[in-house]
Amino acid sequence: MVKIHKLHKIAGLSGGVFLFLLALSGFFLDHDYWNFLYKIQIKTTNPILLEKEKRVINSIAIDGKHIFIGTYRGIYEKQENEAQYKHTFKHLVTDIAFPFIATNDGIYHYSNGVYTPYLLGNKTITSLVLYKDTLLAVENKHTLIEINTTSKYITNRCVPHIQKEQLQEDITLSRFIRDLHYGRGLFDGYSLILNDYATLYLVFLVVSGYGIFYLIRKKHYPKTTRKFIKLHANIFVLFASFFLTILAISGIFLDHASSLRKMMKTTTINHSILPPVYNSLTHDIWSIDFDGKNYRIGNRFGIYKSQDLHQWKLESKGFAYSMSRIGEKLYIGGMGAENKILEKGNYQILKNTPHMFKDVYIQNKQSHYLSHSLDNSLLPNFQSVSLYTFLLAIHDGELFASWWIWINDYAAFMLLILIITGTLRFLKRKRVL
């Protein structure tokens, strides 16, 4: 028992600070629609951070020679012949179906230089598509809302329920690891809450653990020390430990995703043993499309089509991260899947296109792809990074050094030791063992 106690103490003291940083940053990164994460700006000349900041760019619209770039920081706009963008709209923007803007405060409408609230205020709109006088929106990756723009009337609101026989896809280990770590791999609508519970509890455990160590060393506050120990070790910690174990193991895999890519891509997990979320995916609408007749939603399994918003059928496999319609062509950006184009009823692979492109635009009669991985002169040049990007750089270690992933690995390993030794000590105290 003494050895377990010492191991627990060593793991906590040596890994606690790193676990605190990982837990707190991970909690905020899971909530990428919170405004303050982008309103708080940090000036920097660090090229790694500035490159990371391009991830906040997610949509583009060109109206004549007027260019609009939608980002989580807001909208940047300029005329084609102007050198610099102006930051004209400062709500968090998730998508543009010009002249409509999807934000975390509903839908806005642009006209003559003015952005006006349109519908669904206080709602987070995650996707938007416009076809003639029909505007199709997604609220929080979950609810489809159809709007007639002529009457400004909501004609339909529904949650797409895909029948189980249409959700029988196997997934790669790579996809599964990411789903688990990002809070979408266990239960539909609840995985993120469980991630939050685990990460916030880990923050508390680190702080209380250091506090207990300090109080024991001082030997002046025995009653306070005992209260802290009771708070530090209880049944709620055991519950959190299950999810913390998942986060630790999946985090180690993601730290070495590049070197493990082949193994993670070729290892397939059968649908029959996947967690419950993969049998529903109602909170997994990443992209949408409407062509006047067919509705389409894109999720981690692929593209599902419906003509009535009730019956959905799998039309094309592969994570449909984005869908962008230009005329009769539908461009699909894949996440861990091939980019594709739907033209004249047929899907074809889009070769030589950036992975996970976010939008498509036409310039000089050519299709161009909006992606943070491209050195695109059309994108605004940021002179600062958002708090979100700063936290991301802390979480993946790039803020410190390229070798910092090994520090993260060490912290994850110490967390596993803390879970094992802490559980043994708790059960011993309760005379279970």
Image: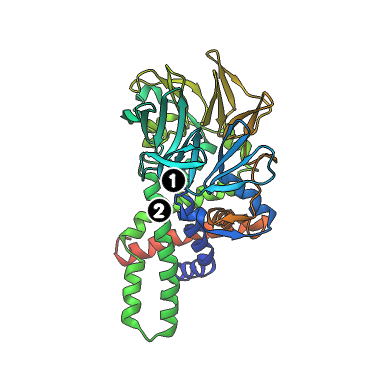
Give the secondary structure at mark 2.
helix
Q: Is residue 26 visible?
A: no
115 left or right, relative to 222? right
Q: Residues within 10 Å of mark 2 (few under 14, many from 20)?
A: many
372 left or right, relative to 202? right
Q: Is residue 243 visible?
A: yes
Return the residue at label 1: 183
Task: Tell me the residue at 40%/53% (across/down).
Answer: 196
Circles 1 and 2, Cβ within 8 Å, touching? The answer is yes
Q: Residues within 10 Å of mark 1 (few under 14, many from 20)?
A: many
Q: How many marks?
A: 2
- Check the image and name the residue furthest to the front: 112
Relative vertical location of residue 175 with respect to residue 234 in this rendering, above or below: above
Distance, label 1 to label 2, CA atoms, is 8 Å
Quarter holding the N terminus is bottom left
Relative vertical location of residue 2 with respect to residue 136 in this rendering, above or below: below
Corner quadrant of residue 231: bottom left
Quarter holding the C terminus is bottom left
Corner quadrant of residue 186: top left
Return the residue at label 2: 196
Amino acid type, callout 2: Asp
Amino acid type, callout 1: Gly
